[in-house]
Amino acid sequence: MPGIVVFKCMRILGLDFGTKTVGVAVCDPTGLIAQGVETITRREDNKLRATLRRIEELAAAYQIETIVLGYPENMDDTIGERAKRTEEFAGMLNRRTGLPVVLWDERLTTVAADEILAESGVPAAERKKVIDKVAAAIILQDYLDNAERCGNKGVYLYGRREKDHA
């Protein structure tokens, strides 16, 4: 239609992967604003089948094209056990969903999420229920705000799409 511009932006899913929870966030259709969606819980760290299934369902429901996964590097830039586990989870996500997975620095996001919730007057007991999805939103918002400007420096991709190799 003349005079009408339609923007189709990429929907991105943000994840904060923990030992027993995964915080989930999505960006709006414009790719500008991240919003927490839910926290997926599991009984044991290595029991991931239901977690992966739920992420796959959310990716389909929100028409996700890329997943941004918080990457817990140590403060001294070394890679610890949690980061290695996150790398394994990124590979599982890619195989399960077929989507590219970007690892994005998540240092101090849980601290920032706790501060935001505390400043908003959320009681400590209630914060535990939502802190992971707030942290996921912080990770995703940081990616939305900085990935292009940074030239994706420090970003690790799992499962690049064919058009990304051009």
Image (cartoon, rainbow, N blue to C red):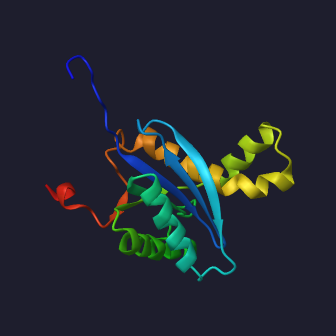
Q: Is residue 109 visible?
A: no
Q: Quadrant of the N terminus?
A: top left
Q: Is residue 24 left or right of residue 145?
A: right
> Residue at the spot x=31%, y=32% of the render?
7
> Residue at the spot x=45%, y=59% of the render?
59
For this orientation, the residue located farthest to the left is 166
For this orientation, the residue located farthest to the front is 1
> Where in the figure is residue 61, as x and y percent of width and height?
46, 55
Give residue 122's quadrant in the image.
Answer: top right
Give residue 2's quadrant in the image.
Answer: top left
Q: How many marks?
A: 0
> Where in the figure is residue 50, as x and y percent of width and height?
56, 76
Question: Foreground residue, 21 or 58?
Answer: 58
Q: Compared with residue 64, is residue 101 higher up or lower down, i.e. above or below?
A: below
Q: Compared with residue 129, is residue 43 higher up or lower down, i.e. above or below?
A: below
Q: Quadrant of the C terminus?
A: bottom left
> Where in the figure is residue 5, as x and y percent of width and height?
27, 24
> Residue at the spot x=50%, y=59% of the render?
58
For this orientation, the residue located farthest to the top is 3
Question: Foreground residue, 56 or 143?
Answer: 56
Q: Is residue 100 left or right of residue 86?
A: left
Q: Compared with residue 28, is residue 108 higher up or lower down, i.e. above or below?
A: below
Q: Compared with residue 54, is residue 133 higher up or lower down, i.e. above or below?
A: above
Q: Is residue 95 visible?
A: yes
> Residue at the spot x=50%, y=67% of the render?
78
Q: Is residue 38 left or right of residue 142?
A: right
